[in-house]
Amino acid sequence: MSTIHYPLYKREDTDAFFALFQNNLANFVVIAVSMLGMGFPASIVFGKVIPGAAVAVMVGNLYYAYMAKRLAVKEGRTDVTALSYGISTPVMFVFLFGILAPANALTGDPELAWKIAVGAAFLSGLVETLVSLTGNWVRSHLPRAAMLGALAGVAITFIAGEMLFNTFSLPVVGLVSLAVILVGVVGKITMPFNIPASLFAVLIGTVLAFTLGYQSHSAISEGLANVGFYPILPTLAPFEGMSYLFGTLVGLLAVLIPITLYNAIETMNNVDAMSAEGDSYDVRECQAVDGVGTMIGAMFGGLFPTTVYIATVGSKQMGAGRGYSILNAIVFGIAAMTGIIAAFSAIIPLAAIAPILVFVGMSMVAAPFNSTDKKYYPAVAIAMLPYLANYVMTRFNNAAGETVAGISEGIVPLGQGAMFTAILLGAMTVAIIDRNFKQAITFSLIASFLSFTGFMHAPALAFNAAPDFTLGYVLVTVFFAYCFLTHDARGKKTNKTPSIQKAAS
């Protein structure tokens, strides 16, 4: 018997590496800038948080490379793509401003606030690991059109849209880099000297920025000032921090639990997206890897949950294998220990790397339409819409209610718990298309329960958190029950009511 040759690294991995690396790099830069702005010392930011987050990234990327190898051998294929992995961007913002910032404000002690946030991250990873036990069951009972539609909503707003805005913020740099990506990746035309398109886009964008004066040379010295040696050391901080989470700061659990469930669903969606592209991974194992990776990162000082990235589909379309994931782990380990992340973020303009993610977002928006039956397109479309509200809401931060009130008072509640709302609206639409009103009733009841408990359409967990939405979904359930009683599976109206007929017999 002959064995397949699944390469450790191939040329296509280079493009995918830069797409994944800059995604993680952007998150690391946001983390560093935000924490320094909150008053956290550089010793904590670059000496503990960044190395700890890098450990989580390293563990997950190496394991997903192993999973890709295992799948390639099992199915006898050489075109398997490893899952992209890193810090979840939406969850990162919640941990920064919903857990770390309040902890810092309440304690007045950055060191203690860091420990509390690290404890929250460890607990979040533990919860996601437990949730993984039901991952495949949930996946099999949620329509693909609903899950991929919700995913496309994230892609068109936070990835393709946000990165296109950044591309156009510096047009001389961004437009040229975007043209390189479209020609090289979409048009599949070879770049000069066979340089990978993504690398060529970053290089030419950076050179243009410095040559034309859009990027100051002082940025280089500012970035290099943070270069040094930051050892990766384990810490017992998570356990000390958790003692406060179950004590005086128990209120932070109301933020922790829903965002962890969101993270688990995000992983499930992204794994399902790769299944639609031909690489089928076990969603339970992936959720467990994300949870364990988060816990290990917390044990080294990192305070941000990790997830499978939706950018994996873009990597798949680039033809990547497992090498990009392995390289990402190695580079981030080196970058975290040396402080190079700060230097990279200062030297490379965002407009030069944003077009790479524009392509990734484009791929994700196209994916559900390419992998679902045409009749389910309305379900995909409605599942995308809640994230438009979520994007507007999160970009205005705490002032969202006042800022967008003149547009529509429905923006904020629609954006709250957007992942749950998107999936359930999409799932109800699929059930209606299939004339499966029993299933539609189930999804509307779940929506009512999540609204009642505050997972959807409410700013925080509470009983009767969104009464109007709770009642609304209950009335929708009643309407679906009427449809079930009066229509058969083909959508034709029946001439009898089942309950009356049964009583008469």
Image (cartoon, rainbow, N blue to C red):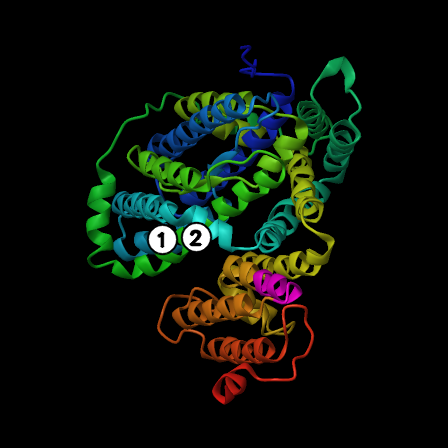
Q: Secondary structure at mark 2?
A: helix
Task: Identify which residue, 418 or 94, lies in the foreground.
Answer: 418
Assess disc 1: are there few (<14), some (14-19) or many (≥20) residues with their C-alpha within 10 Å of its C-alpha: many
Q: Kindly report the distance in space between the C-alpha atoms of the residues bearing marks 1 and 2.
A: 7 Å
For disc 1, the marked residue is 99
Q: Looking at the picture, how far across and down is residue 78, in whole percent?
A: 60, 20
Contact flag, marks 1 and 2 (Cβ < 8 Å): yes
From the viewer's perspective, is residue 405 above or below residue 161?
A: below
Q: Secondary structure at mark 1?
A: helix
Residue 156 sits inside the magenta stretch: no
Mark 2: amino acid: Val
Mark 1: amino acid: Ile
Task: Identify which residue, 211 or 112, lies in the foreground.
Answer: 112
Highlighted magenta segment, given as a residue range: 425-435
Q: Looking at the picture, how far across and down is residue 135, in whole percent?
A: 42, 47
Q: Is residue 405 visible?
A: yes
- In the picture, residue 193 is in which quadrant? top right
Q: How many marks?
A: 2
Q: Could you tell me which residue is drawn at 73 percent across and 53 percent down?
A: 374
**34 horizontally vs 483: left or right:** left
From the viewer's perspective, is residue 304 above or below residue 329?
A: below
Q: Main secondary structure of the magenta part?
A: helix
On residue 94, which mark appears? Answer: 2
Q: Looking at the picture, how far across and down is residue 62, in whole percent?
A: 44, 25
